[in-house]
Image: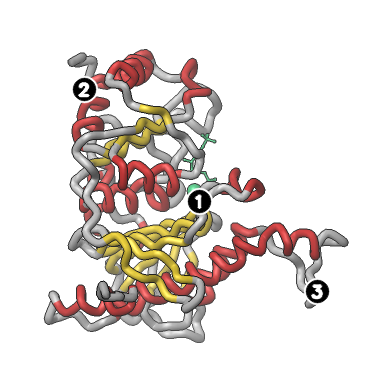
């Protein structure tokens, strides 16, 4: 029989490659896996919970029914704020940084996350996900973490990953030694290693973009899209970044969300640098791929605001570089 490796065992084995590691990062990753299991359970029950909550949006315990994205946010905060491992957190759902409450000790790491990405798909039973990255604090140990702790370029990421809530629940992570994928076995409640050492296949299969907005794109992005079609790539777009990224990670391809002229929110694209682009860029590079804003690697961008948006081109390195070439007006 094949060896069965739980995520806990895997993270511990990875830690052994670093004799100086204290195990704190290992514990944070495990806490995130636990939050993922809690969110997965709630995602599965969401429609039912809503029926129960229809009369005045209260559930059977008399508690107000939280929207799923707020629930996911609260679950991650609750499971991570008391452990003494984190200095501060930041979430796509919350306008400001999330301090560790005064009654709890602080730690050396920073957790930045999008609790439930793909929220427009929640009501339709379409795959959604949690994205996270872990960084080292910049502020002195023993103090409350600061905004500057959260505003670090992706190159400083120590570990990142996502949990995908689809037909199966999967957790994909990298702590800087390749990308590894785990599938939740509901019967035993454990994430088991199913996808060790993921590498983006050299031959891409898909391109993923919301082509409904094509008329709002710059001409070079339109031309790039024609080039991808000329290469016979197949179009797949779910509208949940985690799910689109995950498919292209396993099958090869490119996801892009360019800047557009549609509304005042999107001159810099729609996706958030800290919560979405940077963690997935870390995974893409670890899997042999690349991620760019069209002019520079996503991981090199120094964030200036928590909720900063960025154009994103992510997937096979060759296709990311091709997009950069089109943006520089160099056609192949
Ligand atoms: P969200 O964080 O509010 O869910 O928005 C991010 C999502 C991504 O998952 C997805 O790639 C993108 O928005 C889809 O946007 P659009 O509907 O404009 O194509
Ligand atoms: Mg999101």
Under circle 3, the secondary element is: loop
Q: Residue at x 39, y 80 (%)?
A: 106
Residue 148 seen in render? no
Total marks in image: 3
Relative to 36, say whether 47 is above or below: above
Where in the figure is residue 37, as x and y percent of width and height? 50, 70
Instruction: List the residue tagged with mark 3.
Output: 60
14 or 149, which is in the foreground? Answer: 14
Tell whether label 3 touches label 1 (CB within 8 Å). Answer: no
The circle on residue 325 is 2
Q: Earlier in the sequence, mark 2 or mark 1?
A: 1
Q: What secondary structure is found at the residue carrying circle 2?
A: helix
User: Which of the marked residues, 2 or 3, is nearer the chain's N terminus?
Assistant: 3
List the residue tagged with mark 1.
Answer: 117
Left of 292 or right of it: where is 84? Answer: right
Q: Residue 100's x, y, as percent?
A: 47, 75
Q: Which coloring applies here?
A: secondary structure
CA gap, disc 2 and disc 3? 57 Å
Report the quarter where the C terminus lies: top left
Task: Tell me the residue at 79%/60% (across/down).
Answer: 51
């Amino acid at each position: 029989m094949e060896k069965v490796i739980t995520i806990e065992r895997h993270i511990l084995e990875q830690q052994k490659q670093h004799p100086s590691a204290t195990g704190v990062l290992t514990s944070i990753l495990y806490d995130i896996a636990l939050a993922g299991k809690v969110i997965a359970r709630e995602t599965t029950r969401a429609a039912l919970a809503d029926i129960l909550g229809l009369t005045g949006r209260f559930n059977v315990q008399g508690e107000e029914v939280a929207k799923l994205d707020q629930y996911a946010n609260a679950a991650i905060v609750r499971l991570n704020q008391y452990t003494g491992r984190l200095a501060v957190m930041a979430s796509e759902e919350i306008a400001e940084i999330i301090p560790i409450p005064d009654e709890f000790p602080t730690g050396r790491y920073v957790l930045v996350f999008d609790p439930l990405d793909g929220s427009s798909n929640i009501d339709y039973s379409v795959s959604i996900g949690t994205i996270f990255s872990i960084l080292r604090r910049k502020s002195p140990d023993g103090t409350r973490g600061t905004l500057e702790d959260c505003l670090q370029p992706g190159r400083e990421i120590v570990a990142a990953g996502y949990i995908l809530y689809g037909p199966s629940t999967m957790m994909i992570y990298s702590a800087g030694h390749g990308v590894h994928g785990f599938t939740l076995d509901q019967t035993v409640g454990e994430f088991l290693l199913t996808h060790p050492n993921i590498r983006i296949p050299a031959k891409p299969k898909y391109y993923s973009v919301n082509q409904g907005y094509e008329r709002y794109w710059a001409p070079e992005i339109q031309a790039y899209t024609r080039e991808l079609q000329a290469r016979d790539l197949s179009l797949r777009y779910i509208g949940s970044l985690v799910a689109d990224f995950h498919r292209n990670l396993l099958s090869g391809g490119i996801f892009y969300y360019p800047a557009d002229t549609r509304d005042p929110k999107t001159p810099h694209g729609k996706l958030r640098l800290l919560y979405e682009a940077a963690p997935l860029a870390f995974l893409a590079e670890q899997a042999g791929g690349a991620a760019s804003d069209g002019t520079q690697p996503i991981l090199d961008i120094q964030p200036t605001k928590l909720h900063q948006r960025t154009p994103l081109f992510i997937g096979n390195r060759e296709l990311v570089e091709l997009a950069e070439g089109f943006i520089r007006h160099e056609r192949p």
